Amino acid sequence: MRLFLRLTREVNDLLRDALRYRGDLSRQVDDALVSTDLTKVELSGISPGRSAPALTAMISGRANARLRIVAKQRECSVTALANCALQQWLGRKNA
């Protein structure tokens, strides 16, 4: 599944820095979305605008379904939930 996201500058920079050491962007995004508890990740009101960095990642059907279901349950956008999940996951990876 293709997932188009606009990222906050902080998440974009952290993700791209992580790639230098760990490999494929799509694999990193998929891993973050599958391994993070999307029902509990703190939503920080992130709402990247149209000028925010963007990416298209190929993610598994499992990650895509979880992301969309939980975003609907939590009444937030897929973009906001994905950004918060990526930020939390990157924080754990860089700790």
Image: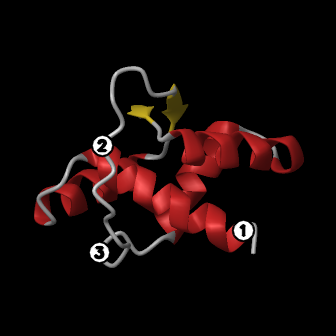
Q: Position of residue 14 (x, y in %)?
A: 68, 49
Spatial CA span between label 2 and label 1? 23 Å
Element type where label 2 sits in the image: loop
* Of marks 2 and 3, the one in the foreground: 2
Spatial CA span between label 3 and label 1? 20 Å
Q: Which residue is mark 1?
A: 93
Labels 2 and 1: the sequence-earlier one: 2
* Amino acid under disc 1: Lys
Q: Quadrant of residue 69?
A: bottom left
Residue at image point 39% right, 47% down: 61
* Amino acid under disc 2: Ser
Tell me if residue 2 can be seen: no
Q: Which residue is mark 2?
A: 47
Spatial CA span between label 2 and label 3? 18 Å
Residue at image point 22% right, 47% down: 77
Labels 2 and 3: the sequence-earlier one: 3
Residue that sits furthest to the top in the current view: 51
- Which quadrant is the C terminus positioned in? bottom right
Q: Determine crowd level at label 2: few under 14, some 14-19, many 20+ residues with C-alpha closer than 10 A.
A: some
